[in-house]
Amino acid sequence: MSEKSFKQAYGVLQKHAETLRNQQEPNIDDLLTIVTESVAAYKVCKERIDAVETALEQALSGAGVGSAEPVAMQPRDSAPSDDDIPF
């Protein structure tokens, strides 16, 4: 796959997923092409995601924001009140 953007590569993955989902019978003749294009598109998406994660980590560490672990929600001991939001 030539240099594509995340959006283009993600579009390829969506298109191929839709094609495979809508097939009544597997089209073996197109399967190799679909898999090859999908793997290449996945690699582009993964590279872009990894690059963004690295850039965010660097930006946050440079801003003094540590990479703290997420805080786990603790179960509540009391029954919900009328003021609680249901979601």
Image (cartoon, rainbow, N blue to C red):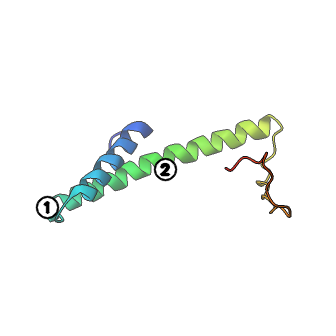
Q: Is residue 5 visible?
A: no
- Identify the residue shown where x is 83% and y is 38%: 64
Mark 1: give few (<14), some (14-19) or many (20+) Cα within 10 Å.
few
CA separation, marks 1 and 2? 27 Å
Mark 2: give few (<14), some (14-19) or many (20+) Cα within 10 Å.
some
- Left or right, residue 31 beside residue 59: left
Secondary structure state at the residue bearing disc 1: helix
Q: Is residue 42 visible?
A: yes
Tell me if residue 57 comes above or below residue 42 in the rendering: above
In this rendering, the count of numbered labels is 2
Secondary structure state at the residue bearing disc 2: helix
Tell me if residue 32 comes above or below residue 82 in the rendering: below
First in sequence: mark 1 vs mark 2: 1
Badge number at residue 29: 1
Residue 69: name its quadrant. bottom right
Q: Locate residue 47, reporting x and y percent.
A: 50, 47
Residue 52: name its quadrant. top right
Assess whether mark 2 and mark 1 are in contact (beta carbons under 8 angstroms). Answer: no
- Left or right, residue 20 beside residue 81: left
- Left or right, residue 25 beside residue 15: left
Q: Locate residue 23, reporting x and y percent.
A: 20, 59
Tell me if residue 69 comes above or below residue 44 in the rendering: below
The residue at which mark 2 appears reads as: 46
Q: Locate residue 74, reporting x and y percent.
A: 81, 61
Between 18 and 4, the residue placed more toward the observer is 18
- Identify the residue shown where x is 33% and y is 41%: 2
Q: Looking at the image, which residue sits at the far front?
A: 82
**Label 1 is placed on what type of residue?**
Asp
